[in-house]
């Protein structure tokens, strides 16, 4: 078999066999297939696409390109969740402890933020002392002991995806549905859960700009997971505005804590309850979606979700006083009120621009070496469909002085007005 034949076959729009894909991907990991050959293959795939069978095979081959986490030593039903990348998306910090507080095992490997999107690990690390690097043995033990752990992905999981993703980033081949589906699912399958819930974002801040494309991606990922015998759900959610009100690391942790106290933004609470209900239903702890949702609502009321978050923070070396007393988190040096210059209903808050504004303040990474400032960011005072008058406070900019003017300009640029309400829906579709 020759790498060139495989590139030509893909370029000519033909279906590759599992053997051909295995040869090519494994060759890329061991260095016998070169970057320039993989680049050509990725671009051919971008234009010619893949059949569902090819994308499934690609996911399975990438899954087995490194360590597959064996969760068989964890007793009980194991679940995982993944978001395709949002702005203000602190869902895991609420959903995971809520679900785990019902005795469902939440064993999650998370990522860092890059560009305009935030990462769960950066948010968790804004809690003093929190350690995201557990060994596999510590990870398994913690989930057995307290039902929950969220850690960073170890370097040995899915090396093929790591190498291919870095190349896709610089060759204009990230936003291909089969490449995204196989990349995400390879990592989710390697992480070993029994049920997986995917949050597929749609809109300006997301990879998928339109609902039909997001639906295609969701269907493909669900199909790949089911072929690997996982219980699968994908939820399409609107990213035409950030999720919740806080964007920035410790600001988002505080909002997650408020949500676990029953005092969070409605869109964030609704998404966590919706995603969580499917996982609780799949675990067999509830007989219907309605019952699962009620169980989760109860875990907010009785504070068991909050207690479970505090237990996880404690177990991973963090100071759990911050969970019960979020006023302990440091504030940025300056909190600037941003006032409306127009009046009307807010029709859109461009998530991409809002995420970028927050990144400029220091909350996100321009490149992998950027050091994050945990306390800076933006807290919205108005959301889509709120009416504002000139002079009303739109948001609070939390800044330590980095790029403040540029961030405020971008903030204004991200807001659109209308004379009518849009009645936006957060949850657009569910694929099971
Ligand atoms: N997230 C991933 O892990 N992979 C992609 O290809 C896109 C988003």
Image (cartoon, rainbow, N blue to C red):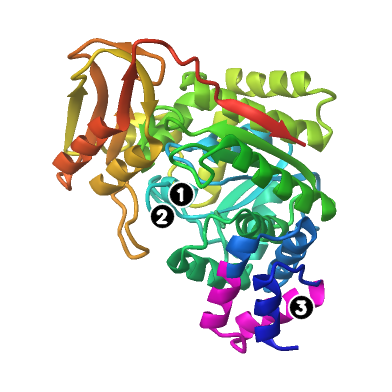
Range covered by the magenta-colored residues: 18-43
Q: Nearer the viewer, mark 1 or mark 3?
A: 3
- Give above or below for 3 relative to 199: below
- Which of marks 2 and 3 precedes in the sequence? 3
Residue drawn 74% across the image and 56% down it: 192
Depth order, front residue of 118/77: 118
Element assignment for label 3: helix
Residue designated by label 3: 20
Magenta-span inclusion, residue 40: yes
Question: Residue 312, position in %: x, y?
Answer: 56, 44
- Cα separation between marks 3 and 2: 32 Å
Depth order, front residue of 104/203: 203
Residue drawn 30% across the image and 34% down it: 378
Specify whether 406 is left or right of 273: left
Q: Which image quarter has ligand 1?
A: bottom right
- Which of marks 2 and 1 precedes in the sequence? 2
Residue drawn 49% across the image and 36% down it: 203
Asked whether residue 292 appears in the rendered view, the answer is yes
- Give above or below for 419 relative to 98: above
Q: Nearer the viewer, mark 3 or mark 2?
A: 3
Please state, as top left, top right, bottom left or bottom right, where the N terminus lies in the image: bottom right
Residue designated by label 1: 119
Residue drawn 23% across the image and 18% down it: 393
Q: Main secondary structure of the magenta part?
A: helix
Question: Residue 85, position in %: x, y?
Answer: 51, 46
- Which of marks 3 and 1 precedes in the sequence? 3
Question: Residue 89, position in %: x, y?
Answer: 48, 38
């Amino acid at each position: 078999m020759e790498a060139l034949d495989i590139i030509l076959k893909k370029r000519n729009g033909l279906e590759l066999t599992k053997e051909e894909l295995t040869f090519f991907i494994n060759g890329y990991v061991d260095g016998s297939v070169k970057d320039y050959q993989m680049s050509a293959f990725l671009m051919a795939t971008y234009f010619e696409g893949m059949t569902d069978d090819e994308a499934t095979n690609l996911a399975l081959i990438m899954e087995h390109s490194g360590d597959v986490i064996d969760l068989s030593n964890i007793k009980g039903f194991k679940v995982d969740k993944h978001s395709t990348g949002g702005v203000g998306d602190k869902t895991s910090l609420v959903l995971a402890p809520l679900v785990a507080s019902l005795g469902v095992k939440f064993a999650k490997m998370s990522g860092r933020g890059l560009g305009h999107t935030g990462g769960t690990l950066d948010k968790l690390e804004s809690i003093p002392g929190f350690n995201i690097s557990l060994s596999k043995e510590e990870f398994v033990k913690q989930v057995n002991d307290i039902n929950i752990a969220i850690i960073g992905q170890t370097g040995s999981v899915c090396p093929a995806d790591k190498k291919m993703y870095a190349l896709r980033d610089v060759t204009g081949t990230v936003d291909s549905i089969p490449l995204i589906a196989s990349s995400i699912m390879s990592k989710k399958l390697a992480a070993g859960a029994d049920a997986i819930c995917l949050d597929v974002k749609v809109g300006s801040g997301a990879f998928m700009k339109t609902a039909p494309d997001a639906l295609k991606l969701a269907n493909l990922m669900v199909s790949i997971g089911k072929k690997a015998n996982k219980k699968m759900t994908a939820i399409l959610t609107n990213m035409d505005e950030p999720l919740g009100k806080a964007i920035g690391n410790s600001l988002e942790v505080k909002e997650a804590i408020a949500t676990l106290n029953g005092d969070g933004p409605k869109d964030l609470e609704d998404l966590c309850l919706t995603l969580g209900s499917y996982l609780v239903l799949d675990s067999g702890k509830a007989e219907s979606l309605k019952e699962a949702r009620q169980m989760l609502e109860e875990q907010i009321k009785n504070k068991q979700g909050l207690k479970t978050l505090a237990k996880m923070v404690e177990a991973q070396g963090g100071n759990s006083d911050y969970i019960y007393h979020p006023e302990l988190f440091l504030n940025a040096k300056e909190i600037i009120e941003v006032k409306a210059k127009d009046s009307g209903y807010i029709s859109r808050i461009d998530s991409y621009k809002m995420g970028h504004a927050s990144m400029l303040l220091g909350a996100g990474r321009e490149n992998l070496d950027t050091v994050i400032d945990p306390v800076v960011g933006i807290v919205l005072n108005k959301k889509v469909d709120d009416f504002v008058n000139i002079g009303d406070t739109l948001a609070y900019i939390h800044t330590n002085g980095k790029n403040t003017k540029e961030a405020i300009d971008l903030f204004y640029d991200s807001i659109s007005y209308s004379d009518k309400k849009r009645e936006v829906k957060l949850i657009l579709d569910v694929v099971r």
